[in-house]
Amino acid sequence: MAIIPQQTFFVWSEIENLGDLERLRLVLEYMPDEDLMQILEKERGKGRDDFPVRAMWNSILAGVVYQHPSIESLRRELSRNGQLRFMCGFQNGKVPEAYVYSRFFKKLFKKEEMINEMFNKLVDELEELLPAFGENLAIDGKAISSLSKRENKNKKEDGRRDLDANWGIKEYKGIREDGTSWSKIVKWFGYKLHLIVDADYELPVAFELTKASTSEVKQAHKMIDDLYETHPELVESCETLEGDKGYDDTKLYEKLWDDYDIKPVIDIRNMWKDEDKTRQLQDYENVTYNYKGNVYCTCMETGKVREMCVGGFEKNRKRCGTLRKLCPAKQYGLECKYIDKCKVKQGIRIDIEQDRRIFTPIDRASYKWKRIYDKRTAVERVNSRLDVSFGFEKHYIRGIKKMKVRCGIALCVMLAMAVGRVKEKQVKEMRSLVKNT
């Protein structure tokens, strides 16, 4: 086990800067694939063994590492690169024909559960190797287009048609610097990869592939429950979960905090239908709040409105906890003519059950919330690597079974490289692997 003496970040760029053969070596040595190999070898039995199971599997991993979009591309590389053939285990100098790979993949597509087990073993290993692994998680859904461009009217399976993909639509909204709003609608035919990643180390801890139309929120509920079943210690040590507006759901907030003690740091949509930008808070006549969780007090003498200061979260008050808000005049030494009569000069407490979306354990109005929410970009970087470094930007995959297995293999490759990199670094060379927080 690698011993890391201080809180650190895994630096993925150190992996990306390694030579191709070195990255492949890390994957081949640290992929926990022995059970899978034994099962496949047992199924092959005493049949012809021109191309051994382990060599075929290693070459598929090489295809992921080297970003080959198709089997033909991989075969061409194997034909010209003797060193690669040797590393994979093809000792006779021959390269498997395309039909050999097709038959091998048909067997792999039936081993989805075993590939998922490999993924979970790697996550368990990273829990032991990396300090505070899983402390901050981020969730997002990634669009993956099918090679097919539309639904096929012919529903008869032939191994080539994509009969599983459907249309997905995602809308992005925002506000420009000049105050005007913008929106962008993205539409694709294919699938959606749902990912939960460690937001500090930028490594996946859970994934699920569904049709493109599947709701991100509904899938998030299932993934969190499944993650607790497979990695209970990781969930128990988790502090926060970051997500964009697509995960803004009251039941999800309640599940995270009430069931798993995880603080949701999720962007919020404006669900207020009225034109008022603020509403009165509880029974305080001079306190209002907006949909983003900012709380304001009004001087009843001058009408001056000021935002109240963040006072922290009190976990053990009420059933789910309370947020404290402090008087801005007292905190900042400001003049307020009404302060002697003001009922909120000593501060107020807001029961987060008043609105679980708006009032969360980490105050939306705090710098801490903004700082932690910025960690959400980690899942976007993982998505980018899947496109650029692992070949999902351009691929030739049809069908949800094939896509699930290919996604699982790619994510296992990502984790295996991380495990290998951590294990092989000496303490004196640790600086090139990690950086201080």
Image (cartoon, rainbow, N blue to C red):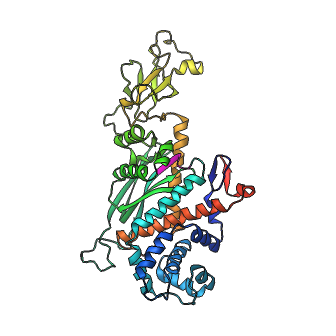
Q: Is residue 209 magenta?
A: no
Of all residues shown, which one is farthest toward the top?
Answer: 340
Q: Residue at x 55, y 41 (%)?
A: 371
The answer to which of 290 and 4 lies nearer the viewer is 4
Q: Residue at x 39, y 47 (%)?
A: 247
Expressed as whole percent of the image width and height from the top left, the position of residue 383 reads: 49, 60
Q: Do we see residue 391 in this rendering?
A: no
Q: Is residue 22 above or below residue 308?
A: below
Q: Quadrant of the N terminus?
A: bottom right
Expressed as whole percent of the image width and height from the top left, the position of residue 278 reads: 39, 29
Count the numbered circles shown. 0
Q: Is 251 placed left or right of 366 in the picture? A: left
Expressed as whole percent of the image width and height from the top left, the position of residue 202 reads: 55, 55
Q: Which residues are magenta?
A: 133-138
Q: Is 355 placed left or right of 128 in the picture? A: left
The answer to which of 204 and 327 lies nearer the viewer is 204
Expressed as whole percent of the image width and height from the top left, the position of residue 185 reads: 38, 57
Q: Is 61 placed left or right of 228 in the picture? A: right
